Amino acid sequence: MNRKQVGRGTALATIAAVSALTLVGCNSDDNSADGGSSSSNGDSNLSGTTGQLTAEGSSAQQKAMSVFSAKYSQAVPGAQFSYNSTGSGAGQKQFIAGQVNFGGSDSPLDDSQMTEAKDKTCKSDVWQLPMVIGPVAVAYKLDGVDSVNLSPEVIAKIFKGEIKKWNDDAIKKLNDGVNLPDKDIKVIYRSDESGTSDNFQKFLKASAPGQWDSEGKAFPSTTGSGANGSSGVVQEVGATDGAITYVEAGFAKEAKLKEAAIDFGQGPVELNKETVGNALDKLTYKGEGNNMVVDTDALFGLKEKDSYPLFLTTYELVCSKYQDSSTGDRVRDFLTVAINDGQDSNLEDQGYIPVTGQLKDKLTSAIKEIK
C-alpha cells in the first residue's frame, strides 16, 4: 500500500468535513523543511517533516485534537493535520483499512482487529497509546435541583429503567435534605456505536456487580431514547427537563448541564481535576510494552476516597513502524507535541485532564520509538 497516496486522498474528504480542525501549511511535500527539524519551540526531538497527516475516530477526543492541532501547527510550520470525528468504531475501521495515518478509539482493538491491522496495514506491531484522558459525566437537567448524588447501583437501575422517578427512595436516600421532584427520569443514550458507551457499560459492570450485564459499543435500547454522538445527547438532555445521560465532561460543560456526584463507596465524589487525577495515579495495564491497554476492570472497580475513576482513556492507534518513514515522522512529531505542549490550560478548558507522572513518562518513551 502506498500510504502517501492514501493519506492525500483521504485528506481531501476529511478536510471538507472538518475544516475547523484542518491546519493548512505552506508546503505539502513529503519532506522536512531544511532537511531537519523546523520546530518553532526548538524541540530537537521533532523531525520537522511537513506534509499531510490524517486521523479519524473518537468524538470524545475531538476537542483535544483541536488543541493539539494548533500546537502542532506552531511547532512544525508547513505540516497539515485533519481529524475526522466519526466515532471510535469508524476510527478503528479506517485505521485497520489503512485509510488514515492513525485512529482514535475509546476502546482497544480486539485480538482479531490487532492481527488484521498488523498484517494488512502496518506490517509491524500495533500500539495503542492512551493519550487523551476524558472524564465521563453522568449529566442531567432537573429544573430547581442544583446538585444530585448518585451511586453506581442507582445509575445502573436508572439506565435499565428500574428507577423511573427522580424522587425514588433510592435517590432520596443519597440526597438527604434535597427536594427531589416527582418527575419522570428520561434516559438519553448514544444511538451510534461508541467507545463512550462501551466504557460506561464496563464501568457499570465493574462498579455495580449484579446490576448490569450488557457490554459493547452499542448501548441497549431497553429504556429511554437515543441520540447520535456526544453533541447529540447533550443537545437532547439540554432540551428535556428530567433527562439524564452519560457523556464526556467537556460536552456536558459546554452545554451547561449539571453533573452528578457519584458515591463509589466512600462518600460522594465530584468530577474535577483532583479527583480524576487521584484515580489516574492508580492505572494498571493489560497490554505489554508500548501497547498500553488500560486495565479497565481494575480502574472502574476503584472505590478509594476522593477518586473519580469514571473516565475514558482514548487511545491513538498507531503502527510501531510505518511502511512510509515520512508518515512515521509526522505521527511521531504530532504525538510528541501533544504529550508536551498540548498538555496545558487549553486542554483543561475543554474538559480534559492533562497527562502527567508515570503515564506521561510511559507515553513519551513509546512515542519516541515510532518509526
Image (tube, rainbow, N blue to C red):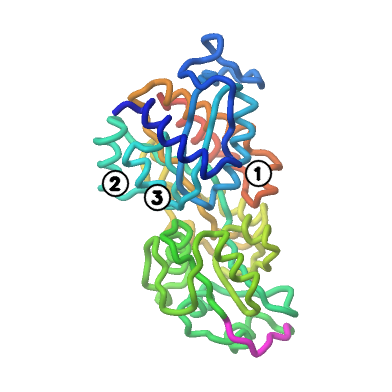
Tell me, for residue 347, which label it has, or none: 1
Mark 2 element type: helix
Q: Which mark is residue 87?
A: none
Estimate the spatial distance between the alpha carbons at disc 2 and disc 3, rounded to whole Å. 13 Å
In the picture provided, is 141 more to the left or to the right than 29?
A: right
Q: Taken as a whole, is the magenta stretch helix, strand or loop?
A: loop
Relative to 262, residue 359 above or below: above
Name above or below for residue 29 compared with residue 252: above
Amino acid beneath label 2:
Gln
Secondary structure beneath disc 3? Answer: helix
Q: Nearer the viewer, mark 2 or mark 3?
A: 3
Q: Nearer the viewer, residue 174 or 323?
A: 323
Q: Quadrant of the C terminus?
A: top left
Do the residues under discs 2 and 1 have CB atoms within 8 angstroms? Answer: no
Which of the two labelled residues, at mark 3 and mark 1, occupies the earlier sequence position? Answer: 3
Mark 2 = which residue? 113
Amino acid type at circle 3 is: Ala
Q: Residue at x 43, y 30 (%)?
A: 8
Tag 1: amino acid: Leu
Location of mark 3 (residue)? 90
> The magenta stretch spans which residues?
178-185
